[in-house]
Image (tube, rainbow, N blue to C red):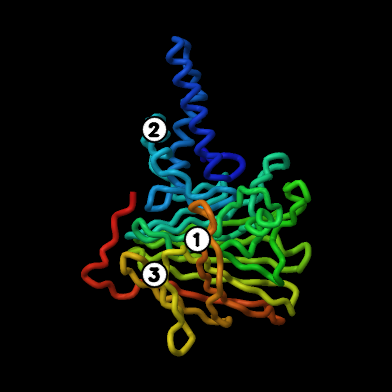
Amino acid sequence: DGGHVTRNPEAQLAGLRYLVDARAALTASHNEVHGAIQQAIDRAAPMLRFFRHGDGRFALFNGANEGDGAIIDRVLNRADAKGRAPATAPHCGYERLRAGHSLVLFDCGKPPPAGLDGDYHAGALAFEMSYGRERLIVNCGAYSGPSTEWRSALRATAAHSTLIAADTSSVEFRADGSVASGPQEVTAMRAEDAGAQWVAASHDGFKKNLGLTHARQLFLAADGEDLRGEDRLTGRSGQGFAIRFHLHPSVQASLTQDGNAVLLRLPGGAGWRLRMQGAVLSIAESIYVGAGGTQKTRQVVLDGHVGSNGAIVKWALRREAKKPHEDPQPLL
C-alpha cells in the first residue's frame, strides 16, 4: 500500500523525499529512471496524504509529530503523483474513515520488524479525529529531547487515545528502545454502506502479561457527525482498565451536570458530546507535544473493571446542533 515499514508518518515523508530526489538526479544526469522508483513514488505519495489531518499536518502515530504542512505540500508537488489517500492501508496497518467534515485515523498494525522499531509507540488501536481543520482527539506525540523518562512515557499506551489495561502498556520496550514484546496478532475488518464506515479491530498485546485481548469497533455515520465506538476486553477477570481520549490543547471540555457526558468545544465553535455506558467517566490533565514544546491539555477517561464475562464499554461522540457561525473550514 506504499507505507513505510516503520509505520511512522515522518519516515513516510522522508522516504518519499529521497525517492523524488533520486528521480530528479537521474533525470538531470540523463539517466533512465527505473520503473521501480516511479512505482514506489506513485504508491508512497497517496499514503503520505493518508496521514494528514484537515490542517495539512500529520497525525501523531509511532514517532511522528505534526510536522510542517508547507514541506509536506512541496514534497507532494514534486512527487507529481495524483493518487488520493486510500481508505484502508492493510499492509501498513492503518484505517481512514472520512465523512462530511470529519476524519478519523485508526492504528490497526503490528510493531515494525526488529531493527526498525526504535520509534514505535505502544498505541495499538489508538485513533485520532479532526473536524474540518481543527483537531479534536489526538495522541500525545513523540518526545525528541534528551530525557529517556519522557521518551518512554510518551511511547507508553497511556499517552494514546486507546484502552490500557491494569496500567500496563501493550508493548514492552528494552533499554535501547527496541520492542521486547508487543502485539503478535492484530486483526482489522472494514465495511461501508451508503457512506457510513465501520472498522472492527483487535490486538493481543495484553495477553502475555494480563491474559486479555482488546477489541475496538469504530463507526462513522455518513454525515460525519456521529462517531460511535465499542471497546471490549476478553480473558482473565479482575483487572482494571482505562479508555483515554486525549484532547487537542485548543479543545474546551466540561462535564454535564449529571456527570454522564462531556461537552467538547472546538475553537471554531463546533460542539461535540461524548456519552458512554459501561464505565465511569472523568476529565483529567494531559500533555501535548505534537506541535513542538510541551502544552498542557486534558483527556477524557473511562474507567472500569474486567468481570467474569469480560468488559464492554460503548461510547458515542456526536456533533451538537450547529449554530450559523460554526461552519468549519473544508478539509484539505
Sequence-wise, which precedes: disc 3 or disc 2?
2
Q: CA distance from mark 3 to mark 2?
A: 33 Å
Q: Which is more toward the observer, 283 or 303?
A: 283
Residue at point 70% right, 62% down? 169
With 157 as the anchor, is 66 left or right in this view?
A: left
Q: Which residue is mark 2?
A: 81
Residue at point 67% right, 40% down? 116
Q: Residues within 10 Å of mark 2 (few under 14, many from 20)?
A: some
Name the quadrant containing residue 265.
bottom left
Q: Position of residue 157 (x, y in %)?
A: 64, 62
Q: Which residue is mark 1?
A: 138
Q: Which residue is mark 3?
A: 226
- Mark 1: which amino acid? Val
Sequence-wise, which precedes: disc 1 or disc 2?
2
Q: Which is more toward the observer, 204 or 261?
A: 261
Element on which disc 3 rests: strand
Looking at this view, name the residue that lies furthest to the left: 324
Q: CA distance from mark 3 to mark 1?
A: 17 Å
Q: Is residue 62 above or below residue 275?
A: above
- Mark 3: which amino acid? Asp
Q: Position of residue 274 (x, y in %)?
A: 45, 75
